[in-house]
Image: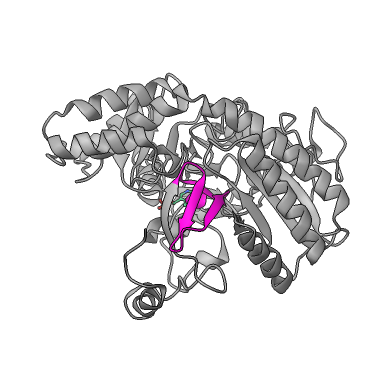
Amino acid sequence: KYQGPSLEKMKIVRKSNLNPVLTTYYSQPLAIHQGYKQWLFDLEGKRYLDMFGGICTVSVGHSHPKISEAVNEQIRTLTHCSNVYFHPNIHEYAEKLAAKLPKQLKVIYFVNSGSEANDLAILMARTFTGKHEIFSLKNCYHGMTYQTMALTCNTHYKYPVLPNPGFSKTMNPDVYKGIWGGNRCRDSPVQSDRNCSCLEHCEAAKQYLKQFQEDIKQEFFTPGLAGFFAESIQGVGGAVQYPKGYLKGVYDAVKSAGGLFISDEVQTGFGRTGDSFWGFEGHNIEPDIVTMAKGIGNGFPLAAVATTQEIARSLTRATHFNTFGGNPISCTVGLTVLNIIEEERLQENSKQIGTHLLMELAKLRELSPFVGDVRGKGLMIGVELVSDKESKQPLEPEKFMKLWEKCLGYGLILGKGGLHGNVLRIKPPMCITKEDADFTIQVLHETLQSI
Ligand code: PMP
């Protein structure tokens, strides 16, 4: 039973002592006390199905007993010693994590958050290539440190400050709202049929690519392309997928311009997309750097950057050091997460339950005038709500909130995202069941009718 401070007391503290921009997600704050597997429990003990997984972070389930045991054991033995000494955990974990990656990505740097990982990847791209310009896609999210804020391209996360120089953006190849339309990756169970019927050679991908090639031809203040960052499927941006062939095309263009390709797998990694362990797999590309966070630690502050021996060598001109990165506790968590994903076959579950969810959501798209688009892969899903399917105008915020809060009333937690906040984001712990998926569909069916 919950015995901590009251909700009223927490509201006061939040107002006076915490980041004022993070008010309440719902009109009344939701105060969570406990979690177990795919469920969260509020102060009164009401149970919620967590289909947002702490923003795509809880990969193997809340309070997984194997992680609790491993952490307890490690805390009893040693919390911290620093990476200037050898500790078995970091060695065991680095070897196991590297084995999950393409063979050229052998070297792992451990850090504590996704922003830190991307910050380090920027540094690597610049030190290795000796060039400065970094490209990313409009509508992307790569972090909130001062440096990654310049990489991120979403107005909600932009302050009116002079950004760090050397960051450019190219058009977002959004198959739903982008000007060139485009079909999705053929692997997606929810094919888009808009504007483009060419499956093999997607015209939209070609057009977006042409734009990128124009963009990198410009003369930059600092010469040359150092790197290109992309999420395999945009997360915060609203589960945006690219037209078939785009990632491969952009990868080739970046490589021939002498830059590095950086795959941000912070949301799409660790089996979430179902078919593969990493979201970039299946796109016929070999990233030079992969950044990861969130699901890697199931909610524990752990993140990493994987790269090649050559790129890592370029970072030896100075000492790269991180006090907490790779500490014995975070490594034990990371290692246990990898074991659980394998033992409980969670990647397979992501594929199976995610595909079922996508197919059922696609039926809702046919039934409801408000479901404009259903997209994603595995358990990385977006449902874009619109006021009008023809114009694709975002659903009015009041209606969106009404639906969203009704879902909460039924005990269903969903995320929201996209530039206009009109995309339902479904990224639950990967241990959810078919019953959970069916419950989600049932609640959405009901609540969509109510607006
Ligand atoms: N990259 C992506 C794709 C993300 O979604 C996020 C977080 N939303 C980050 C990087 C930054 O991670 P963190 O919040 O751990 O710094």
Residue at image point 65% right, 34% down: 353
Residue 327 versus residue 11: which sits nearer the camera?
11
Q: Is residue 156 above or below residue 235?
A: below
The image shows residue 144 at horizontal and vertical percentages of 42, 59
Labels in figure, total = 0
Specify the quadrant that holds the C terminus. Answer: bottom right
The image shows residue 60 at horizontal and vertical percentages of 46, 36
Residue 314 versus residue 336: which sits nearer the camera?
336
The image shows residue 237 at horizontal and vertical percentages of 60, 54
Q: Is residue 178 visible?
A: no
Q: Which residue is the extreme one toward the front? A: 1
Horizontal relation, residue 275 to residue 76: left or right? right
Specify the quadrant that holds the N terminus. Answer: bottom left
When asked about the image quadrant of residue 416, the answer is: bottom right
Residue at image point 15% right, 38% down: 76
Residue 190 versus residue 363: which sits nearer the camera?
363
The figure's colour scheme reads one colour
When asked about the image quadrant of residue 296, the answer is: top left
Please report the bounds of the magenta region as a residue range: 36-58
Q: Is residue 406 above or below residue 256?
A: below
Q: Is residue 203 above or below residue 1?
A: above
The image shows residue 404 at horizontal and vertical percentages of 66, 63
Q: Is residue 27 visible?
A: yes
215 is within the stretch colored magenta: no
57 is within the stretch colored magenta: yes
Residue at image point 37% right, 49% down: 119
